[in-house]
Amino acid sequence: MNPRGRRKVREGVVTSNRMQKTVVVSVQRTVMDPKYKRYMRRRTRVKVHDEKSTCQPGDRVLIIENRPLSRDKRWRVCKILERAVRAEPIPDLEAGAQP
């Protein structure tokens, strides 16, 4: 075992990248209801350090636990698993573009 111990690794979807070098990642997990024994989806939103600011909203990322980097950030982006599908902008018909 390495000297830092076992770090938690999670997979999530980027929901916001409006901060500098920080993205908000939504991590989903399933838990069983103690009374009804049904599985429910639970969501956790964490702030994640993105050193190169390469993540965009909708990207699936792998994040790894890290030492505290700020008041809220305790995770960092390990790698981008899947890029979000970007839609092509539709030209404005009012701006003079011909159909």
Image (spheres, grey):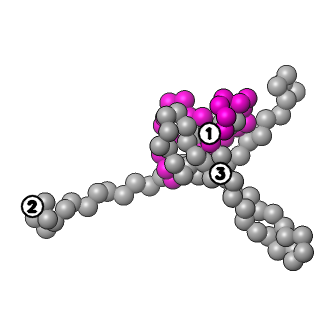
Does 46 appear above or below 2? below
Determine which of the numbered discs, if any, sits on residue 45 in the image.
3
Label placed on residue 39: none
**Does any portion of residue 83 appear in the rendered image?**
no
Q: Residues within 10 Å of mark 2 (few under 14, many from 20)?
A: few
State the image coordinates of residue 77 (x, y, percent, origin top left): 61, 37
Left of 14 or right of it: where is 5?
right
Q: Residues within 10 Å of mark 1 (few under 14, many from 20)?
A: many
Is residue 36 shown to the viewer in this render?
Answer: yes
Q: Residue at x 84, y 67 (%)?
A: 32
Report how far apart the C-alphas of labels 3 and 2 lie in the structure: 43 Å
In front of the other: 4 or 22: 22
Please report contact status of discs 1 and 2: CB closer than 8 Å, yes or no: no
Q: Secondary structure at mark 3?
A: strand
Q: What residue is at 26 percent from the left and 61 percent from the top?
A: 90
Q: Residue at x 49, y 34 (%)?
A: 20
- Say which residue label 1 marks: 48
Q: Which residue is mark 2?
A: 96
Q: Are marks 3 and 2 in contact (CB under 8 Å)?
A: no
In the image, which residues are magenta? 47-72
Judged from this view, the residue extending furthest toward the right is 35
Answer above or below: position of 27 versus 32. Answer: above
For mark 1, give the secondary structure. Answer: strand
* Tag 2: amino acid: Gly
91 lies left or right of 41: left
| Residue 70 sits inside the magenta stretch | yes
Q: Which residue sits at x=19%, y=62%? A: 92
